[in-house]
Image (tube, grey):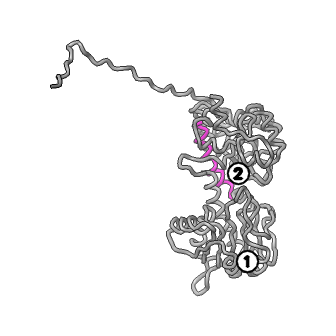
Amino acid sequence: MSKKPYISPSFSYVPLEETLQIAPKKKQLFIGIPKENSFQENRVALTPDAVSVLVNEGHDVAVEHSAGDGSFYFDNDYSDAGARIVYEKAELFKATTIIKSAPISDEEADLLQPNQAIISPIHMPLLKREILDILVAKKIIAIAFESIKDDAGTYPIVRSMSEIAGNFAILTAARYLANTDNGKGVLLGGISGVPPANVLIIGAGVVGEFAARTAFGLGASVKIFDNSLYRLMRLQNNIGRRCFTSVLDPLTLGEELKRADVAVGALKPVNGITPVVVSDAMVSYMKAGSVIIDVSMDRGGCFETSRLTSHEKPTFKKYDVIHYCVPNIASAVSRTASRAISNVLMPIMQQCADLGGIDEIVLAKAGIRRGVYMYKGCVTNAPIAKRFNMKYTDLDLLLASQS
């Protein structure tokens, strides 16, 4: 027979002291926003509203003179937000963290300070070994903002720019179909009794989805090609309607291109390069006056006839087909694009300060680590290291060895 437990009158419960995590000391940041002079860049990485939030939290923000002019954010907007306007680029690059909307230029690489942090995009086709060598020598922490992931596992800046590119591609095509830009005088959506224009979209990613949304919204007839059945099904589900979809069968694609008034290239790159799926011969059979918008141009383009154009001279004709092959499409609507980028980067800067600095946010946030391609003298991006025959160091192992 088991005995009942005996509790002595002298027995008492003594609570243990709770051990609380000590919050890291908030760090004051010194952020520099330079004026972009290359890559036809009109965007700015932080808007005056975002700067105002950071300044009110005690951070020092320096903005180079006329840095936001391309997006119609002027010096007085930034000074009213609490930023310091700097007239010398060398003076601006004394900031501990540089935030850019264009890739690092040769001039800027020379101005970087040892152990600085820089957040900017990278443009793989134009990336130079000389710039990487400077970043290594100066032990820079370099983060590619298009590779930053959010808590949902998506790339927020890439998605925003892709949404812009998809919308803008159709609006641009509508413009070049009109007589005002030497087009053949076709209204994209048609009217009662007159059929709409035929829009063919190659690629069912975010760009393709938003191009399709805009084309459907304007009343066009839309056909979408992609080699991923999953992406085609997801696009139809997201749009909420059935539409013509097909895998990238050359015969079917060639036949539909003959009927198309607009062809949008929106394929995702494979190993950094967009596959060419539309041959020169296919383009030669397209209708005279039809329009090609190659959104994939920044990764090589998916039309064999594509060649790089600029915002100043955006189009050329081949086989009487108008080609629009501007690589940095989002820069054409720079104010919208700047707000989209700023909406992502401003909270990251707040987190960076709360956690104690760039080193701490890289250690704490896996999504930020995805964007780090250079860390204190080590190349931490495998494709970059392979392309330039540089030593690759895994960032997670590097941080583990330092902790």
Residue 43 position within the rendered picture, expressed as x and y whole percent measured from the top left: 70, 51
The image quadrant of residue 234 is bottom right
Q: Residue shown at 61%/84% (left/top)?
A: 195
Most distant residue in the left direction: 1
Quick one: label 2, few (<14), some, or many (20+) residues within 10 Å? many
- Which SS does the magenta portion mostly show? helix
**Secondary element type, mark 2:** loop
Q: Which mark is residue 124?
A: none
- Relative to the observer, which residue lies in front, 86 or 285? 285
Q: Residue shown at 75%/47% (left/top)?
A: 384
Q: Which residue is mark 1?
A: 290
- Relative to the observer, which residue lies in front, 91 or 233? 233
Stretch in magenta: 333-352
Left or right: residue 255 versus residue 241 is: right
Q: Which residue is mark 2?
A: 43
Left or right: residue 204 versus residue 109 is: left
Counting residues from the start of the chain, the first of labels 2 and 1 encountered is 2
On screen, residue 397 above or below 388: above
In the rendered image, is residue 88 in sight? no
